[in-house]
Amino acid sequence: MSVVVITGSTGLIGTEAAEFYAGLGYRVVGIDNNMRQIFFGPEGSTDWNRRRLTETLGTKYTHYSVDIRDGRQLNRIFSEYMEDIALIIHAAAQPSHDWAAREPLTDFGVNAGGTLNLLEAMRHYCPEAVFIFTSTNKVYGDQPNNLPLVELNTRWEIDPAHRYHNGIAESMSVDQCMHSLFGASKLAADVLVQEYGRYFNFKTVCFRGGVLSGSRQSGVRLHGFINYLMKCAMTGTPYTILGYKGKKVRDVIHAEDVVTAFHAFFTKPRRGGEVYNLGGGRASNVSVLEAITLVEEIMGKRLAHTYTDQNRAGDHVWYITDLSKFTTHFPEWQMKYSSIRMIMEDIYEKNKVRWRDLR
């Protein structure tokens, strides 16, 4: 039986990927030591996802509580399954700007060092496997803030005549800008994944995601914007808008659609360190103010919220993804959750029971 190795297997993308590939008949090897709880406290714990995966997937899922910074442990796992590994999905990360600034060594060790450990494990034990890296649009730093943005009533928007009006493409520079320490560590990992593809001619790919969301996320104040916003509304927790007048814009893609994009690449892999921007694009994007309005419409009640003018350093004012490179290479891929409302309604419906006791 072919094996899919997933790091961050109890997180948002990892969980969706584990269920997807187990459903296709693959054996899934999950690597996740629940560092999200260390980063964000009990609210960020993903243990509930681990329990659900082991219960629902049974023998199709094997879990290892291993830190990706531990190269020896990773080598032990890879050597055990080396003849059967067909795909590696690397979704483990320290994902917060603010947390990275508090502990840069840990952030870089997880995001960059952990990625290097996995690439080396692939090189030594399964060099013909496909390596998919969940990168981030933060590799572009604050370059998007130099675009000719226009302030509207509920959002910032870009000049319709600009070449990036339909979204930011992979051609945007990642150089000479502020990234945040998190963005820098993810960029280092991104370049490593590209280089292993180019230098060794491996089947590696970086998917630079926008806001990845869905019902399986353990959203917290510092990470998981849409999921956390809905959680606040459902539990009566006040929400704090961080800067940019609440008009900053993000495109949002559902985790299921992320995984089907991964699978499209897996079934027709390209060698040489490919890079794709991946997000909701023009079909699924929202400002913070607009997201609050949507939450209130879905819930049928007001969301208590406050505003602080202190935005996060290096944060994007406006970011929408240009999907054209990926959809040109993989025209068969289509988003199931084609609007931000569909994503938010999914989060609401599937978390009614889980969040009920938090009110």
Image: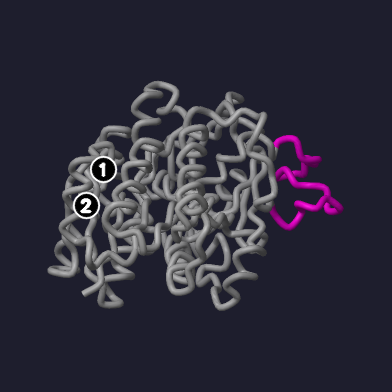
In the picture provided, is 48 more to the left or to the right than 138?
left
The residue pinned by badge 2 equals 48
- Residue 61 image point, x, y percent: 19, 64
Which residue is nearer to you in this view: 225 or 296? 225
Image quarter hosting the N terminus: bottom left
Judge whether residue 355 can be spotted in this image: no
Which residue is nearer to you in this view: 313 or 125? 125
Range covered by the magenta-colored residues: 145-167
Q: Which corner quadrant of the image does residue 328 belong to?
A: bottom right
Q: Is residue 62 above or below residue 118?
A: below
Q: Which corner quadrant of the image does residue 155 belong to?
A: top right
In the picture provided, is 68 more to the left or to the right than 206?
left
Q: CA distance from mark 1 to mark 2?
A: 7 Å
Within the magenta stretch, is there residue 147?
yes
| Amino acid type at mark 2 | Trp
Give the class, few, some or many, for how many residues have Cα within 10 Å of label 1's Cα (few <14, many ≥20). many
Q: Are marks 1 and 2 in contact (CB under 8 Å)?
A: yes
Which residue is nearer to you in this view: 73 or 107? 73
Q: Secondary structure at mark 2?
A: helix
